Image (cartoon, rainbow, N blue to C red):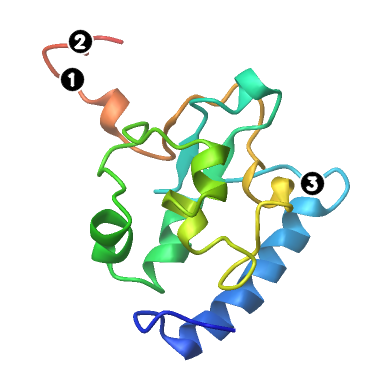
Amino acid sequence: MSVPKWVNPKALHAGLLASVMCAALVMLPGSKAWAEYGDVVINNYSEDSDMRPVVFPHWFHRIRFRCKVCHGDLGFEFQAGGNDINMLKIIDGEYCGACHNGNIAWGVENCELCHSGKPGLETHVHGSTLKSLVTPGNQGQ
């Protein structure tokens, strides 16, 4: 397996083990999808394509990689919904597909591992207080 030089091999091994454990939780019959504080729900195109929203475990990736890996090298914007991510781009190795290619992390054939959100979730940062802040454009909403 070819691993980029910016990936910590020990963290990769720990990450693969944790990924398997998370996948097992998601796939348990009757299990409810969950998101941790700071995880990103991505539903720009998912439900329009009859797929569940993606729950991106930001904290899980952040403990393994520096911010610049995704937000610099891979081009992710610092805003939920600020990226035009779709499966064609992922398959072509853009965004998530840079790692989720079947070599570094699981590939696109494991849909339910990423598309694990409850239907109807809007794109946002889970647990964010942003919507509850009183700002000029958000008074009393």
Camera-nearest residue between 102 and 92:
92
Label whose residue precedes the other's in the sequence (1 or 2): 1
Q: Amino acid at mark 3?
A: Ser
Tell me: residue 6, above or below residue 34: below
Q: Quadrant of the C terminus?
A: top left
Residue sitting at 67 percent across and 42 percent down? 116
Q: Real-space Cα distance between discs 2 and 3?
A: 37 Å
User: Residue 121, percent across and down?
Assistant: 55, 26
Q: Quadrant of the N terminus?
A: bottom right
Asked if disc 1 and disc 2 are in contact, CB closer than 8 Å, the reply is: yes
User: Residue 26, percent across and down?
Assistant: 73, 52
Left/right of residue 136 with respect to residue 94 in the rendered view: left
Question: How many other residues sit within 10 Å of disc 2, few (<14), some (14-19) or many (≥20)?
Answer: few
Q: Real-space Cα distance between discs 3 and 1?
A: 35 Å
Q: Real-space Cα distance between discs 1 and 2?
A: 5 Å
Camera-nearest residue between 117 and 111:
111
Tell me: residue 75, above or below residue 43: below
Q: Amino acid at mark 2?
A: Gln
Q: Total of numbered circles in the picture?
A: 3
Q: Which residue is mark 1?
A: 134
Tell me: residue 114, above or below residue 2: above
Camera-nearest residue between 97 and 139:
97
Left/right of residue 23 with respect to residue 40 in the rendered view: right
Label whose residue precedes the other's in the sequence (3 or 1): 3
Q: Amino acid at mark 1?
A: Val
Label whose residue precedes the other's in the sequence (2 or 3): 3
Q: Which residue is mark 2?
A: 139
Secondary structure beneath dot 2 equals: loop
Asked if disc 2 and disc 3 are in contact, CB closer than 8 Å, the reply is: no
Left/right of residue 122 with respect to residue 78 in the rendered view: right
Secondary structure beneath dot 3 equals: loop
